[in-house]
Amino acid sequence: MNSDLITLQHIIQAHGRIKPYIRHTPLEYNGELSRLSDSDIYLKLENLQVTGSFKARGAFNKLLTLEKNKREPGVIAPSAGNHGIGLAYAAHKLNVPASVYLPFDADASKVKALESYGATITYFDSIEEARVSALKAAKETGYTFVSAYNNWSMIEAGGTIGLEILEDLTEVDTVITCLGGGGLTAGLCIALKSINPNIKVWGVQTKNSPTFAVWHQNGEVCPVDLQPSIAEGLSGPIELETVTFPVIYKHIDRILTVTDEEIIEAMKLMLKHQYIVEPSGAAGIAALKQLGIEIKGRKIAVVVTGRNISWSRLLNLVK
């Protein structure tokens, strides 16, 4: 299926498919953030999702739609952590073998989670080397390669978050979400705009890895200078042929970028409210301070995408 053919009905079907395996996460009003911006800020807490991030949605949607002869050999994926955890968890629940290719510097807490779900782990020097190696292994072994974003299953799953936001807050007028490979954002765009074309969708990337921001500005894919970021889930090269870009380019209203320092401040704020949020998951919160009074009077849902970070790394970042 081409991503251009994904409809609201596909997303509704995906939600029904994965519902027995995932949580309808809370959409929580935040008084402090609302007062700071003179708006109504609600947090879609996917950091409370099973496996600690939204990625479980896409993993279940992909595995549940795989034909039996594709499931039996197993699945393989490169990951900075959360995609691999979601896939390993779903594979464990559905009795599918899973192999995850990680960079050596993957967060220790993510590695432990992967191990707990029985995934076979192989390490590489970078996430790009892991991706290329996983693609090669899939061809050689018959495993099904599962991209974290470049397939229709992930886009559909991203849209299920939009359905839940609208179920809990019908009057929402703006949704802010972190933007990595684009599966979540593309799905949100399709779901939200299909139901209410007036809803604004804003994506947030890091200044160090602004691929979609540059592509969106230029109107086409092009080389982008990438630098390391603490938000590894939003960083690194994006496949030039990704199916997510045409959807995002067509539907998204705005793409913002935030610094690592702004992300750390957002993580501290979430800790103040007793929520652990990893750097990638805090990008949307980081954008709120940057927006300031510009968002006055809006009803905004911010997707907080994950919490998977080791205690040692968390304490080092927020010290």
Image (cartoon, rainbow, N blue to C red):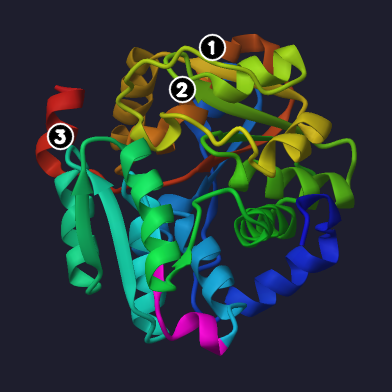
Q: Residue 286: which disc? A: 2
User: x%, y% of residue 248?
Assistant: 73, 35
Please provide the residue range marked out in magenta.
Answer: 68-75
Residue 273 visible within the image: no
Within 10 angstroms of label 1, few (less than 14), some, or many (20 or more) residues?
few
202 inside magenta stretch: no
Residue 253 visible within the image: yes
Q: Residue at the spot x=63%, y=62% of the render? A: 153
Residue 105 drawn above or below residue 101: above
Quarter where residue 211 is shown: top right
Residue where numbered disc 3 is placed: 313
Screen quadrant of the N terminus? bottom right
Using the image as rendered, state which of residue 268 and residue 54 is in the foreground.
54
Element class at badge 2 = helix
Q: What residue type is labelled 2?
A: Ala
User: x%, y% of residue 68?
Assistant: 54, 89
Position of 80 with respect to 312 (left or right) is: right
Element class at badge 3 = helix
Q: What residue type is labelled 1?
A: Gln
Of labels 3 and 2, earlier in sequence is: 2
Q: Residue at the spot x=60%, y=84% of the render? A: 67
Answer yes or no: do the residues labelled 1 and 2 have beta carbons within 8 Å? yes
Q: Residue 89: which disc? A: none
Q: Residue 290: which disc? A: 1
